[in-house]
Image: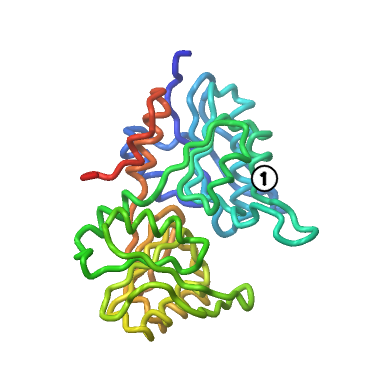
Amino acid sequence: MQVGELKVLSGQSNPALVDEICSLVGTTVGGCEVGSFPDGETSVKITENIRGKDIFVVQSSCTPANNNIMELLIMIDAARRASAQRITAVIPFFGYARQDRKDQPRVPITAKLIANLLVTAGANRILTIDLHAQQIQGFFDIPVDHLYASPVFFDYLKQIDSKKMVIFAPDVGGVKMAAAYADMFDCALGFVAKRRTSATTVEALNLVGEVQDREVLIIDDMTETTGTLCAAANLLKDKGATKIRAAVSHTMLNEIGYDRLAKGPIDELITTNTVPIDTRGLPIKVLSIAPLLAQAILRINNHESVTSLFKIKGF
């Protein structure tokens, strides 16, 4: 099938990222008016002809999550009804991903619900980065291109002397991701055992790994209150770590998170712009994910493989 002309549409969640993507792709943001009716309902109107075109709708489901998800669904529906050839939902941060299984009686599997809604709205393909749970890819009956932020982090972190560094997962669930980074940097691996006492409070109980007189890099996929990160960092400092960095793919800090970072033991928080973030003068380094997404969009548009985007230069 002959590929249609590429066109990128933007929701309101992260327009700065979309502008950067379009600059790298060599196009401009497609004409689309997104707003609200007086009663708060989302209003969408695509203001240019997209018949037969290859549409990429870029929208993260960050705060306000429900509004951004509805925007995405309505934009996809508008593009489908405007006779777009193919619609790819580009979701740098896929929300509701923590609700990916029934771990208690009478709770929903909301990640599956969101997947169903995207397909029903008319998405033909999903492009996302660092899902909270890999199995969410299986919730879709359409192709999912799941990219990783690790190549972006590696380009920044390779300046650090890895002989002095140990990679830590802030909880048992993050060991697999942390192990990939430990292999990448050829350094030691450890993890922290934690207990969640409330939605915003975490207690670090113990750690496995050697941290005395070592620099520590904590790997996690997302944070809001930094409770898990700061609890792990406090325990690591108590055990003799000299410097603590954290590399987090998606950082959506609330006031509790900002306050903990300002007072906490994390020397540098490294993150990406999958969601907009205000550093507020704190030691937060924001790396751009736009080149990775731009390359993926171009490859999808040209029916090319995105496998090479998983590879890290020098490996």
In this orientation, which residue lies closer to the viewer: 207 or 181? 207
x, y percentage for residue 80? 61, 27
Image quarter for residue 201? bottom right
In this orientation, which residue lies closer to the viewer: 110 or 72? 110
x, y percentage for residue 154? 28, 54
Q: Residue at x 38, y 79 (%)?
A: 236
Residue bearing the label numbered 1 = 112
Q: Is residue 268 left or right of residue 297?
A: left
- The secondary structure type at the circle numbered 1 is helix
Q: Quadrant of the C terminus?
A: top left
Q: Residue at x 50, y 30 (%)?
A: 55
* Up-down relation of residue 219 to residue 43 (above or below): below
Q: Is residue 236 left or right of residue 212?
A: right
Query: Which residue occupies the extreme bottom position in the image?
Result: 238
Q: Residue at x 54, y 21 (%)?
A: 85
x, y percentage for residue 235? 43, 81
